[in-house]
Amino acid sequence: MTLTNMVGVRCCFKLLYAIVVLILLHMNNPCIGCSDREKQALLALKQGLVADDNGYGLPFWGREAQNKDCCEWDGVYCSNHTGHVVKLDLGFQSLHGKISPKLIALQHLEYLDLSWNNFSQSQIPDFIGSLSNLRYLDLSYANFGGLIPYQLGNLRNLHYLDLSFQDYLPGSTYSIYAKNLYWLPNLSRLKYLDLSFVNLSDVVGWLEAVNMLPKLTNLSLYWCNLPPPVISSVSLLNSSKSLVHVELHKNNLNSSIFQWLPGTHTNLVYLDLSKNKLSGRIPESIGQISNLEYIDLRRNSFEGVISETHFSKLSKLRYLDLSSNSLVLNFSFDFDWVPPFQLHEIRLGSCKMGPYFQKWLRTQKSSDWLDISDAGISDTIPTWFWDLRNKLVYKDLSRNQIRGNLRSKLASHSLNVRWNQLEGPIPSILSTVSMLDLSNNKFSGSASFLCASTTEERNLSYLDLSSNHVSGELPDCWIYLKQLEFLDLSNNSLSGKIPTTMGYLFSIKTLKLNNNRFVRELPSQLKNCEELTLVDVGENKLSGLIPEWLGENLLNLAIIILRSNQFYRSIPPQLCHLTDLQILDLSMNNISGTIPKCLNNWTTLAQNGPSSPSIEHSNYFPLGESTIYDLPYDDEATLTWKGARLKYKSTLGLVKSIDLSSNMLSGEIPTEITYLVSLVSLNLSRNRLTGQIPPRIGNLQELDSLDLSRNQINGRIPISISRIYRIGYLDLSQNNLSGKIPIGN
């Protein structure tokens, strides 16, 4: 037999052998569909669950698919060996309703995901604890409520348990809770545990329960209202050494937690203890956890000195956040200390490290983020600082006493140097940044830098030049700044007309040009800025009619401030289209005519209900080559309150105000104003209003300040005023009123 024939025969034998093996495998592993009992359990589950309008639901369960193998149904996975249902993945289906107890027929189930649904605060079914083969259970973001059933402790094969974020829907807070965690140590195979946003305030022995999970690697218990841990020698001896990820932020922990950490958790990579009640000194022993890559201790009450010893063995550290404490960074200055780490993010805001820039910062060649705000620095910015590599995309040097000029080339996408002593002209840097805050400095010169070297559209989304000494006219080049979402040029010496090309700011949400010297009318091109929520052009020399397009085109407006200008004629009724309006300040103009009766269309002011304290906007900018970071900002406004000019930022969302004072308005106060039941301040003083105070003025029970003084109002003071029990400032003087001011409760 020739070699060629031998090779051919061997190939034939190999092919025949492969075919035989495949046949045997097929005989030993027949394609078995799910049992009728399991199919009926799935159909019962489907019958109890329906989808929201935007959800997918379970459309193919039990229809044309009813006669098919249920292993082929969406979200159902079966074992290739037995045909039993082993995995049920119903996450992100927008389901609501009731989970059928027939689910327990799926006794071979190993994986159950019901996350991102809405079970309307119903309790987690205790019969889930009968699914004894479960290895993976995810009920997060499912709007469950009530007591966590102790029967979950029967799931002794469980590796993954996530019950977090049940309160993701508005209006629900700590709706799911546990009184103890006695059942938790039964889950001895558990590797991943997330109970974030579960109320554990009554669980005194939570740490002891966690310590009895020998294989646990990931622990997330943030925003659980955890009490301080009870540390005992027994708990320390039993402590799990497998933990890699510990996330305990936003609780009530004290510094005793540090007795549990060092030495016992040598594998720890991620540690977040932020927003707790930790105090005293940060122990140096934290520097012995050599695998740490991420440390977040911000917003506690730490004090004392941080030295090199705290970082002696942290060569793998990539993220460090010690901000919002009372710490002092005191590294050896008799030599150039070179840290053992290369940080990607350095967050040391409020840590005192001045008066000079610390030289160790220039050794960090991989940083994306640097925050040394409020650090007690009173130095000029050294050359090496500006030369930090281009990878550093965010620099925050705000709230220091830094002196000198700003460099014309910035190696960062975002720069915040507000509240410093920087001076001189502003260089042409807008082409290199996406976020720039130079407010509250001593910058001077013209605004020509805004248009310097303008050849293409820029990525700038946030620009704050407020409270400087910038003067002259604004250049008309805003067509190249279409990405701007926030623009604050207030409190400068800018003059001339507002440029018409500002109408190209299609993304602008906040526009503040107040306290300058702008003249003429508001350019009609601004009607194209349909994303605007706040417009403040107060304290200028603007004139003309109040534009009708404010109410016709800018329907997202919530705050309008035109005070202290020279606007005249009547208030356009088109403003009544602004259903989101919460602050209207037209004071100190030459406005005449009557107050529009349609103002009860201002829905936000006409409805009672909870409001967010601040008005927050997202602000996305690139962090590195592939990451988009959100650095949100809060709107701020200066308003007249009880006769004083006050700034509002963290509570601006709570302010519901109408100020039409110091104009020439006439006629009666419209009854419709009493429908604005969430008003907190109403100022109609110094006008020519006549008639009576609306009898139902007492409907405005949220009023804290009411000023109707210096008008020509007559009649008796309404007794309903006594129902405004929150009122702290009331001025009805210099009118023709009679009777006593009613005394309320």
Image (cartoon, helix red, strand yellow):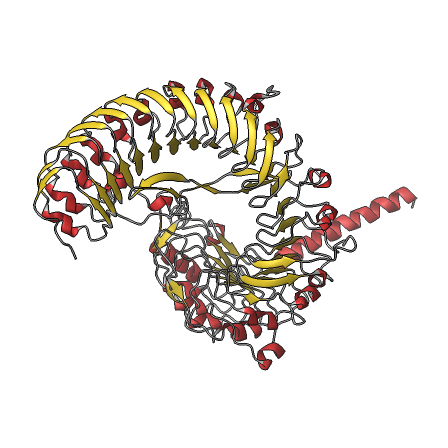
**Number of marks:** 0
Q: Residue furthest bottom?
A: 234
Q: Residue furthest front?
A: 734
- Toward the viewer: 439 or 711? 711
Q: Residue furthest right?
A: 2
- Is 683 situated above or below 284? above
* Quadrant in the rendering for residue 306: bottom right
- Is 519 situated above or below 615? above
Left or right: where does residue 260 sit relative to residue 15?
left
Q: Name the residue rendered at 58%, 39% in the picture.
A: 421
Q: Name the residue rendered at 46%, 57% in the picture.
A: 140
- Toward the viewer: 624 or 733? 733
Residue 224, horizontal then vertical, whole percent: 46, 63
Q: Name the residue rendered at 61%, 74% in the picture.
A: 239
Residue 471, horizontal then vertical, whole percent: 51, 25
- Toward the viewer: 675 or 222? 675
Residue 465, horizontal then vertical, whole percent: 51, 33
- Is 690 situated above or below 744? above
Residue 204, horizontal then vertical, whole percent: 46, 74
- Toward the viewer: 503 or 361? 361
Left or right: where does residue 678 sit relative to residue 73?
left
Q: Is residue 528 visible?
A: yes
Q: Which quadrant: the C terminus?
A: bottom left
Q: Is residue 581 visible?
A: no
